[in-house]
Image (cartoon, rainbow, N blue to C red):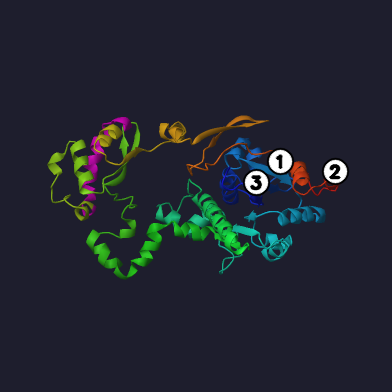
Amino acid sequence: MQVLDGIRVLDLSQFLSGPRASQLLAMFGAEVLKIEPPAGDSMRMLLTLSGSERTMSCLHQNKKSLVIDLNSPAGREVFLRLVDVSDVLIENLAPGAMDKLELSWDLLRRRNPRLIYACISGFGRSGPLSNRTAFDIISQATGGTMYGNGIPDRPPGVFFGDLCSGESCAFGILLALMAREKTGSGQLIDISMQDVMYFHNFWGFSEKATRPVKDEISSIFGRDVTRLLTDYEHPMAFWNSYKASDGYVAVVALSDRHWNHLMEVIERADLIGDQHFDDFISRVKNADESRPIIEEWMGRHTQRQIIDSLGEKRIPCGRVQDYEQLNNDPQLDARGMYRTVNHPRLGEIDVPGNPISLSATPGEIREPCPDLGKDTAEVLSSVLGLTEEQIAKLVKDGAVV
């Protein structure tokens, strides 16, 4: 048995945010029906055109694909019948798109009061920007993540806006399912990608919380505390990524104990107790003095030598891994984060494992991303009880594929 056995999810979403939410639900047993237009969703089309279709199976495991033309009256009616017998609907379409299709939250909850309607958008369903469309980079820009990471002039390399919003959506769906057990009613889940990025931006919201004492704190450290660990012109020696002879190693030596052990490792025990580095405040103020000393030692050693030496002293450290190293990591392998699925047309595909480990009801990865419309007939038959003749007519009319 899996935790979400018996939960049916209609997934109208595209790109990354909504599919990440339904991916997590599908891993734990939910029946996810991926509803696509006749040409396929935008992500499928882009990846197919670029020859990267295999990537679809990294985000759409365990799902079923149905092709339904929601612009067709017959197709819309099929979709509404599915809404009647489903628990969750996920959509991340442009603001107002569901209203134009006459599939608004107000309409759908009247048909199915138990329905949980999860909507992901750039700025949410309220506020002055609620009608604006957005993608990952927009949410990271407006949520302060790009500024906080010191890259206001460059697009981010990781799609946190999309993927974190998808995880927040999945969490909201689980909460709504729990609430429904108590109330019997569904509800609307309104996820703003900007909200999610702000919520994850620790320095951003802590700056607001500490604003009344900001000058006092800055005078203690000799710098703006919100840039304490991300001042790339003057980085902290105890919180830094150092260049080894064959790559980079991230090192954290926040405590006095870790700092003293680090000095021992780099053969500078003479600096232990030095007034310039004797406590945390001193190490902040004099980072430009200590950092070159550490850099020089690091540059003479390999990543492995550094990690082994620091590891012996239990100093937190880790190799800055490129994609080749990342995808051949023994720790990730031991944790089951490298999985494979067999696609009937594309063959064996490497996919990420499940990062949420439950001892009694673990998630499973069973199936690759289905081909476009692979499950339309089967679902219409098994879920809605349509006959072969009825399905054939819908296909002929272009309502489904």
Marks 3 and 2, Cα distance to the nearest angstrom? 24 Å
- The C terminus appears in which quarter of the rendering? top right
Q: Which residue is mark 2?
A: 392
Q: State which tag comes first along the sequence, 3 or 2.
A: 3
Q: Which residue is mark 3?
A: 31
Which quadrant would residue 120 be assigned to in this image? bottom right
Identified by mark 3, the residue type is: Glu
Q: Which residue is mark 1?
A: 372
Residue 71 appears in the picture as rendered: no
- The N terminus appears in which quarter of the rendering? top right
Question: Foreground mark, 3 or 1?
Answer: 3
The reply to whether the magenta stretch includes residue 291 is yes
Question: Foreground mark, 2 or 1?
Answer: 2
The reply to whether the magenta stretch includes residue 296 is yes
Identify which residue, 264 or 247, lies in the foreground: 264
| Helix, strand or loop under label 3 | strand
Q: Which residues are magenta?
A: 284-305
Residue 101 appears in the picture as rendered: yes
